[in-house]
Image: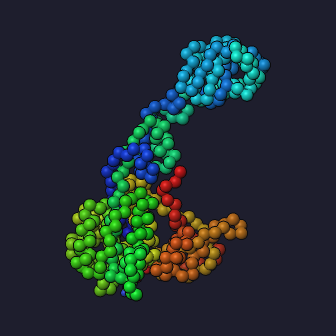
Amino acid sequence: MISVAEARSRVLAALSPLPAELVGLTEALGRVTAEDVTARLTQPPVSMSAMDGYAVRCADVAQVPAKLRRIGEAPAGNAFKGHVGPGEAVRIFTGAPMPDGADAVVMQEDTESDGATVTVLRTVGRHRHVRLAGIDFRRGEVGIPAGRMLTARDVGLAAAMNWPWLRVRRRPRVAILATGDEIVLPGEPLGPDQIVSSNAFALAGLITACGGVPVNLGVALDTPESLARLVTGAERADILVTSGGASAGEYDLVRGVLGDRGMDLDFYKIAMRPGKPLMFGRLGDVPVLGLPGNPVSSQVCAVLFLRPALRRLLGLPAEEETRRTAVLGRPVKQNDQREDYLRASLSIGPDGELVANPFESQDSSLLTVLARADCLVVRPPFAPAASAGDTVEFLPLGGGVLSL
Ligand SMILES: Nc1nc2c(c(=O)[nH]1)N[C@H]1C(S)=C(S)[C@@H](COP(=O)(O)OP(=O)(O)OC[C@H]3O[C@@H](n4cnc5c(N)ncnc54)[C@H](O)[C@@H]3O)O[C@H]1N2
Ligand code: MOO
């Protein structure tokens, strides 16, 4: 059995970023930039007023009240063409270009006007209420680096940089193949010995949240023929993920059937709980990640291996394994040779400390426990028993891409 770290680096080594494609800005949320997004213009293009008021020369209002001659008007989008000389002011509005000669704006609340003249009641310093040309960005500057999953804020920035479309990585197509004679789809008539398929749906959710496109190939029966038939659907996928049929029994056929079809096996079995019978290989051009059938095992392995794999295909930087620390809320026993990922809740302790509470039962069939968990407490191989209050590492669960 190889270690979790070794298994993950082998998976990542076998993958490279997908080609780029163009998408319109309204399709860009959650996509990953394939190149730096540079500004196509300078913003603001010229110096502009940040207030409704009067554009003045600050020297003219050093002593107040100061009576100035109103020589014109500058609404947004329509610059005043003349020059502001000594003793003069231009009526200006938020977002309008600063007139030549003026170097500050007085808010209209700090003025009195009778139409032809304006009396300034408060002094202003140079550039007060003026947004200087280029304070946001300048033409050619990088606004968004390559390899970033776009937030709504990034999309707004790209629009302001005058891009109607962006070059992003193609979304990875992930074929999902569930296996098992006992598996039926949610809502289907259910025999007494059957169970409802949950793995494919949880995996599809994770794939979508990670920026991929799940492609459901259905449920294969535990026969070589059924498996072989359904697996052909994965031909044009960027990665095939199977669920179930991975362990040692006579009905656990995935490795054998894919092997007969020419799969190059990279590894099988890792020192991890849950998820020991994890498999990785390549069938033709398609990398194959074989997840165990136990629902929690398949989802925990997806978090640990499929998520980094998708990040790699998308050209995202390797996940600096978002591990954090907390103190244990209850004791845990000594670990064996398999790295353990305990489902746990998180809470804040009396002194403001983060407390991780592993659930009592860690059976890999318990979907209720997994759904309630906030994190996975990581117990390295052979970690000694730990008491309440001891510091442990955990991997947070959750956190999608569709964020502002
Ligand atoms: N003799 C041994 N038996 C087992 C070993 C072992 O090393 N030696 N390993 C155990 C471990 S650890 C795991 S994990 C499981 C993995 O088993 P498989 O990948 O072969 O999975 P299945 O047998 O097909 O199913 C296991 C379990 O999960 C349920 N299942 C399967 N698919 C789905 C699905 N799509 N949705 C919901 N639930 C699913 C299935 O009904 C079984 O209950 O093997 C141990 N055994
Ligand atoms: O590894 Mo299995 O995933 O322990 O249940």
Vertical relation: 326 (above or below) 401: below
Left or right, 47 with reference to 35 = right
Percent from the top left, x then y, of residue 24?
39, 44
Question: Can I make out residue 392 in this image?
Answer: yes
Left or right: 68 with respect to 144? Answer: right
Quadrant of ligand 2: it is: bottom left
Residue 45 percent location from the top left of the image: 51, 28
**Front residue of 82 and 315:** 82
To which quarter of the image does residue 290 belong? bottom left
Seen in the image, is 83 located left or right of residue 363?
right
What is the quadrant of the N terminus in the image? bottom left
- Relative to 71, does residue 293 appear above or below in the rendering? below
Q: Position of residue 218 (x, y in %)?
A: 32, 71
Q: Give me the residue at 74% from left, 23% from top.
A: 111
Residue at 69% from the left image edge and 20% from the top image edge: 58
388 or 156, which lies in front? Answer: 156
Q: Position of residue 83 (x, y in %)?
A: 59, 13
Left or right of residue 193: residue 330 = right
- 256 or 92, which lies in front? 92
- Where residue 11 sits, quadrant-wise, is bottom left
